[in-house]
Amino acid sequence: MADVTFTIDGQTVAAPEGEKILWAAQRAGIHIPHLCAHPDREPPFGSCRLCYVDVEGRSGPVTACTEPVAEGLVVTTRSERLDRLVRAGFELLMSTHDLDCKVCPAKRSCGLRTISRQTKVKLRSGDLAKLLPNLPVDDSHDAFGLNPNRCILCGLCVWVCAEQVGRGILDFAHRGLGTHISTFDGEPLAAQACDADCLACVDICPTGALFRKIP
Ligand code: FES
């Protein structure tokens, strides 16, 4: 694909036509907060709503993980309005996330902590009431576990298991506020054909919802 040239925050950037703004920006050293995107995940899921940018000529902000680059595009990643949107999106995610950092195995690799540092939005902020799913932790497998109360529904585990590993063991269950990640029919992880050599879902989980039980 031929390269196109455009600007992000006044910086001239070249990228293959059709590449998403998020990845072109990242390569150019311009960080846009994101949690649910992966360069190989097509189509992008677009669920976390942290990657808002402004594109000149568009009536409202667009998500950088879904918006393709094009010749002459003028992209802005920071403004008062965008900061407000990112703050609101992050606070919404945090309202459904159990903030058990002291015991969470994600610790320094936690994507939420990274976003908090980058955006200066505190992990414990905002007036939103906590809406935790209050679902049981599945600790049945020898190698890994699933704590749905830490999950932010980015779906990366579902994607990696189905599209990269080729198994499709995890999926979204139920709808609305009851949505959570589950095996088919809620069977325990121990009953699945998962082995300790895979754990791709654990490696890609940004929040410690899926966690390794063995080092
Ligand atoms: S990274 Fe764009 S919506 Fe999540």
Image (tube, rainbow, N blue to C red):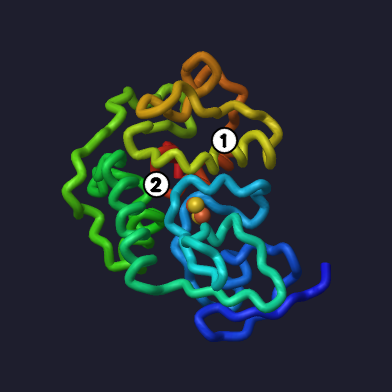
Q: For this view, does 154 lie left or right of residue 149?
A: right
- Which residue occupies the foreground of this view, 190 or 26? 26
Q: Quadrant of residue 201?
A: top right
Vertical arrangement, residue 50 with respect to residue 205, above or below: below
Image location (x, y in percent) of residue 144? 46, 34
How packed mark 2 is, by other alpha carbons closer than 10 Å (few <14, some 14-19, many 20 or more), is: many
Q: Pick the quarter of the image with the N terminus.
A: bottom right
- Which residue occupies the foreground of this view, 203 or 48? 48
Residue at the location (36% across, 54% down)?
A: 112
Q: Pick the quarter of the image with the C terminus.
A: top left
Image location (x, y in percent) of residue 75? 54, 74
Which residue is the site of mark 2? 207
Which residue is the site of mark 1? 158
In the image, the residue with mark 1 has its CB under 8 Å from the nearest atom of ligand 1? no
Vertical arrangement, residue 121 with respect to residue 215, above or below: below
Q: Are marks 1 and 2 in contact (CB under 8 Å)?
A: no
